[in-house]
Image: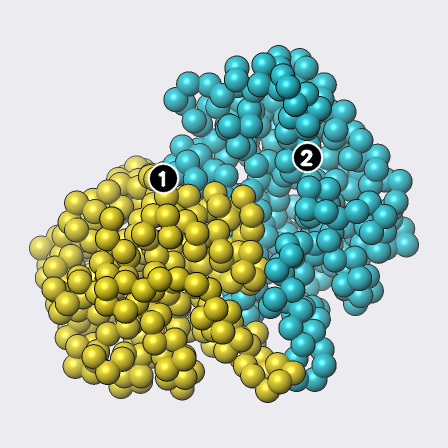
Chain colours: A cyan, B yellow
Amino acid sequence: MEEFSDLVMKTSMEKESSIVVGLDPIISNFPKNLQGNDNICKTIYNFNKLVIDVIHPFVVAIKPQLAYYEVYGSKGILALEKTIKYARSKGLIIINDAKRGDIGSTAEAYSEAFLGESSLSGHAVTVNPFLGSDGIVPFLNKSIDSSKGLFVLLKTSNPSSSELQDLTLYNGNKFYMYLASLLKGMSTSLGTYGFSNLGAVVGATYPEQSKILREYLPNTLFLVPGYGEQGGKLTELEPFFNKNGYGSLISSSRSILYSYIKEEPESWGDLKMSQLKEIIEAACIQFKEDINRIR
Amino acid sequence: MEEFSDLVMKTSMEKESSIVVGLDPIISNFPKNLQGNDNICKTIYNFNKLVIDVIHPFVVAIKPQLAYYEVYGSKGILALEKTIKYARSKGLIIINDAKRGDIGSTAEAYSEAFLGESSLSGHAVTVNPFLGSDGIVPFLNKSIDSSKGLFVLLKTSNPSSSELQDLTLYNGNKFYMYLASLLKGMSTSLGTYGFSNLGAVVGATYPEQSKILREYLPNTLFLVPGYGEQGGKLTELEPFFNKNGYGSLISSSRSILYSYIKEEPESWGDLKMSQLKEIIEAACIQFKEDINRIR
């Protein structure tokens, strides 16, 4: 099976794209005729299918955010399973944004869920490193077995990420740099394009840190949230890419999915499918082109 | 609605117990006649129901570990929903060990899933603080609205928890103490028994740190994993309790659930329901009494 990092690179080159669209289904944001009846699974799946149909030629990957499925319990998870299956049929890479972190056999169960043979399994998963290498290695081992990928949270996009991640240590180093050194020390082989299957999450809102991290981790794919809706600016994304214009996947969720709310603030609730598709497609193409201008 | 911390304290006093049993269903550990056919949901639910029937008089709470359900996708999550419903009918407190951590509306969705009206919602959830207060406050706000509880990972029980959580900061303080000060600074009201609904996870394997943390956070309920199977010793649990013998819930999972494997190493696969129940009950009562001896 092709290594995750190679799959990302090949897809990125073929589609001339470095973007990922997050699938965060929020039913109250759907136009009325898509809010459906009581069948939550069908309602979510139909919306995701519409989005996938529109965006798949332009994006490297989709990034389902687990919270928006879990909130509907088993029905939501069923919608995610169906979404993953459909996305696969469109040749899309699936990065489950689960931010799971646990130890021992529990971490093995999570890695089986997201990188194994389970119905939820995609091509990569986001991982929370708070528990130390005990919480990362089981995912890493699974990724080696399955040729899949993981993105470890390194410097997140939110305002208070500084509270813990930017703490200064006894030797003057920053906490996130120490974490970066832990990741660098984890042995992983590199794919054909020079990247590892062990990636990192680095927020678009911290361009200075990203520059340092990009130089320190030249073989690490970055998954980059926080562009647009969270205030990350286009020009500040430049340091996320290497000199060849690769190495980062820029993610956006709600500003693409719900672009019609901004575009048609008065009448979005009554939009027809065809109008919806046009607006989402235009927002996705604009996103892709914006990123391509600076990388 | 009764505050979570009061519910814990009342239950603890009524049952004369400070123990929690984790529900980590691992089908290959079930006796043959419980491994069922292909109906994974039913197989897991039947085992959990058997365990709940046996242990409910002796435990303050059950602690389902989400990974072991998620690995079976929507079928596993359905088994968890049914388990939660059944546990409620037995008057049990449910602490979902999900270790979720995210920001903004995503964290709100997780907190709705686990502390709201969702089918997965119990009485409390474990939360990962890596993202800083942005990742904690949405859960805290939800717990205030719903009178439910959260346990924030503070010093986890695994060997490599020291890698990040014990880092020494520029001022000589330890990382986990800085995190403890963040939690202390979060305004929460106290219940009738003097405890907050904002609890913390502190591993049984770190008695020195727990002593410092117990003194620093006198109003914080500790959820304590790592006793037994991970090497935490009985006498080392003393500092987890205050002078009245309260303040901590000691958790054990597999050494109770799968006590029959240790008890009957040759023939556990062929055990009958009645034998299984007897062995699990004895292990649970022993666990409860052991903890009561030192608190």
**Residue A275, located in which quarter of the rendered image?**
top right
Q: Is residue A286 left or right of residue B269?
A: right
Q: Residue at x 79, y 47 (%)?
A: A233
Mark 2 — on which chain does it sit?
A: A
**Amino acid carrying mark 1 in the image:** Ser
Q: Position of residue B274 (x, y in %)?
A: 9, 55
Q: Position of residue A39 (x, y in %)?
A: 41, 23
Q: Are marks 1 and 2 in contact (CB under 8 Å)?
A: no
**Amino acid carrying mark 2 in the image:** Ser
Disc number at residue A255? Answer: 2
Q: Secondary structure at mark 1?
A: loop
Q: For the residue carrying disc 2, how many other residues have a C-alpha within 10 Å: few (<14), some (14-19), or many (20+)? A: some
Q: Residue at x 53, y 75 (%)?
A: B178
Residue A10, visible in the rendered structure? no
Q: Rounded to the nearest whole Å, what is the CA distance between mark 1 and mark 2?
A: 27 Å
**Residue A76, located in which quarter of the rendered image?**
top left
**Residue A38, located in which quarter of the rendered image?**
top left
Q: Nearer the viewer, residue B272 or B93?
A: B93
